[in-house]
Amino acid sequence: MGNIMKILVITGNLAAPLVKNMAKKIIAKKPEDEIIVHVADTQIAAFLTPNRIIKEIKNSYSSDLEEIDMIIVPGLIRKPSTEIAEALGVPTFKGPTDAADLEMVFELINEIELSETKTADRLIEEEKQKKAIEFIYSFESDIKLREKLLKKPNNILVGKLAIGEDFPMRVLAEIANAPSLTKEELISKAKYFCDNGADMIDIGMIAGENMSHKIPELIAILREVIGDRPLSIDTLNPNELKVAIQHDIDLVLSLDLGNYNEVLPLLKEKAIPAVLLPTNYKKGFVSHKPHERVEAMNELIEKCQGIDVIVDMVLDPINSNSIVDSIVACREFKKNDKKSRDLPLFFGVGNVTELLDVDSPGVNSLLSGIAMELGASVLFTPDESGKTWNSVYELAISSKMMFLAKNRGSIPKDLGLNLVLFKDKKKRQKEIAIESSGAIGDIDGKNNVPVYIAENDPKFVHDSEGSFKINVIHGTRYDKSKIIVTHFKKGIADLAIEGTDYRKIYNEILERNLLSQFEHAAYLGAELQKAEIAMITGKEYIQDFELFKKPLIFDNF
C-alpha cells in the first residue's frame, strides 16, 4: 500500500463505532489515504452476504466506484469476497474477524497479500509463523555457522545433534520404564515423541533393578524408529550404563560422584558424552543448598575430564525442597568463576510438571523461558500423565519460541509461534449485553428482546431410526486422532462413520437418514462437537458426561 489509496471498509451497526475509531487512527498515521466506513443495514456484520453487500454498495456508491481502490469486507462473512469483486469491479478482500484488529491489518498490509477467502488476521498469523519457521530452518541448515559455533566450549555434539547455548534448547523425551514395555508399546511411544518434535529420545530404566540384558534390544528397536535422533539412557546403575555404552548409546544419564569412576574409562574410549549430577547416591548424598550443589558439580567435572558433559543441577518440584533454590543453583553455577560455567546445562522440566496438578502448556512455556534465561541447552521430560499429555510438543514449540525471542532481543510474544491453546490472546469486543431491564440488546441498548432463563432439563426421546455410540481415538497428535460414531438399530451395530470434523460426520448421518427426531439431532450435534474438542485438546471423551469441570465458586470458601 505504498501509493495513495481510497479504501471502503464495510461493517455492521454493532461494530461501527469501533471501526470508525480504527479508521481515524489509521488516517492519523497516513493522512494521504482515505478510508470510507460503510455501515451496512444489519446489526451484526457476520450476517452479511455477498449479494447484500453488492446491492448496498451499488445503491450508495454507484457513481464513485471507479475512485475506490479497495473494498474490505468483514472477516466474519462466510462466503469468499470473489463475487463482490467481480460484481463491483473493485478488488475486494476479507478483513479481520475482529474489528479491533483492523489497525494491525493496515499497519502490516505491505507485508501480506490480502485474500478473498482467508481473514486478514489469519493471514498475518500465517505470515509470522512462516517467517519464524524459515528463520529456524535457515539457522539449523547453516553448516558453516554450525561448525563455527561447535568450536565454542558451551556447545557440543550428541550423536549428530548440536547442543549448547547457541542453539535452540533441545527436547529430550523420556520413555519411562522402557524395559517393561512390549516392542509395540516401545515403538508407539518413540513414534509419538518423534511426531511431537522431540530432538532426542531417552530410554528410562527401572530404578533399583538391573535390566542390562534388555538394553541391546531396546537400543536396536529404537534406532529403527528414531532415525538420526540421538538416543540416551537414564540410569545410575554402572552395569546398565556399561552395556549401553558398549552398544553405542549417544548420551548417558547420568554420572555422579558415586558411579563415575566405574563408567568413565569406557566413556572416554567411546567418546560418548554424559549428563552429570551433583550427587552421590551410593553414599546417600543429595544436597539441596545451591552452593553445595555447585561445589559438588565442580568436583565431578574435574574428575570427568576427557569427555563432553552436560550439567544437571537438578530442578526440584514445587515445595518438595525448593524449586527456587534449584534455579538459584543453576544461576550460581553459570556465574561461578570456573571454565565449567560455559558447559551445556540440563533442565529437568518433567520434575515439575508431573508433580503439579495444573494443565501443562503454560507451565512448560514458563519453565522454558526460565531455562533460556539460565542458558540451558536441554529440556528433559517424560509424557506420562493425562495432565502432561503433549508435553513434548509443548516444549518443542516453547523452545523455538524462546530461541526466536533470544535472537530478536524481544519478549516471547507475537513471534509467529505460540501455545495459546485454551484461551485467546486478547479479549474480543462484546456484541451483545444484558440490560438492567432484563432484556437483551446491543451495546447501545437498542432492539431489546425478552430474555428467558433456560431451566428445562433435556428429556430422552427414543429415535425410531436408532441410536449412536461416539468414541474418540487419540493418536500421536490431534491431527492423527479421529472420532468414530457407531450406529445401532434395535440394539445391533449396523454401520460406523469416522472422521475428524464433527460437521462432516453430522452431515453424513443426515444424508443416510439416520435421524428422525429434532431432539435427537440437537443432542447428536452437541455431542459430536464435544467429541471434536476432546480430540483436539486430548481430553477424555465420555458420551453424555461433561468435558470440562465447572469452575469453583469462591463464595463456597
Image (cartoon, rainbow, N blue to C red):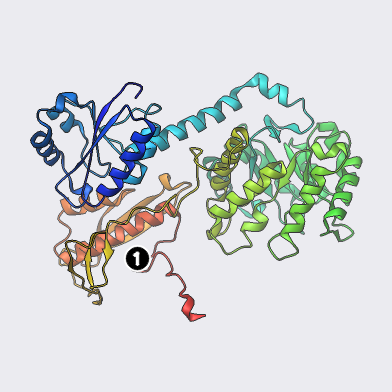
Q: What element carries label 1?
A: loop
Residue 120 pos. (x, y %): 33, 36
11, above or below 272, in the image = below
Q: Judge the density around disc 1: few (<14), some (14-19), many (≥20) Cα neighbours within 10 Å.
A: some
Q: Nearer the viewer, residue 531 or 191?
A: 531
Locate residue 494: give its quadrant: bottom left
Left or right of 55 in this view: 377? right
Foreground residue among 307 and 240 = 307
Residue 376 against residue 116 in the figure, above or below: below
Asked if residue 174 can be seen in this view, the reply is: no
* Quarter of the figure with the N terminus: top left
- Residue drawn 80% across the image and 36% down it: 342
Q: Which amino acid does label 1 sit on?
A: Gln
Q: Where is residue 28 in the image (x, y as percent from the top left)?
A: 36, 35
Residue furthest to the bottom in view is 556
Residue 380: % across, % down:
66, 47
x 16%, y 42%: residue: 49
Nearest the camera: 459 or 183? 459
Q: In this view, does 409 lie to the left or right of 134?
A: right
Height in image: 274 above or below 64? below
Indicate the position of residue 284 as horizontal and vertical percent values.
Answer: 87, 61
Count of numbered marks:
1
Residue with the mark numbered 1: 543
Quick check: 29 left or right of 332? Answer: left
The residue lying at 83 percent from left, 58 percent from top is: 289
Is residue 255 among what the camera can see?
yes
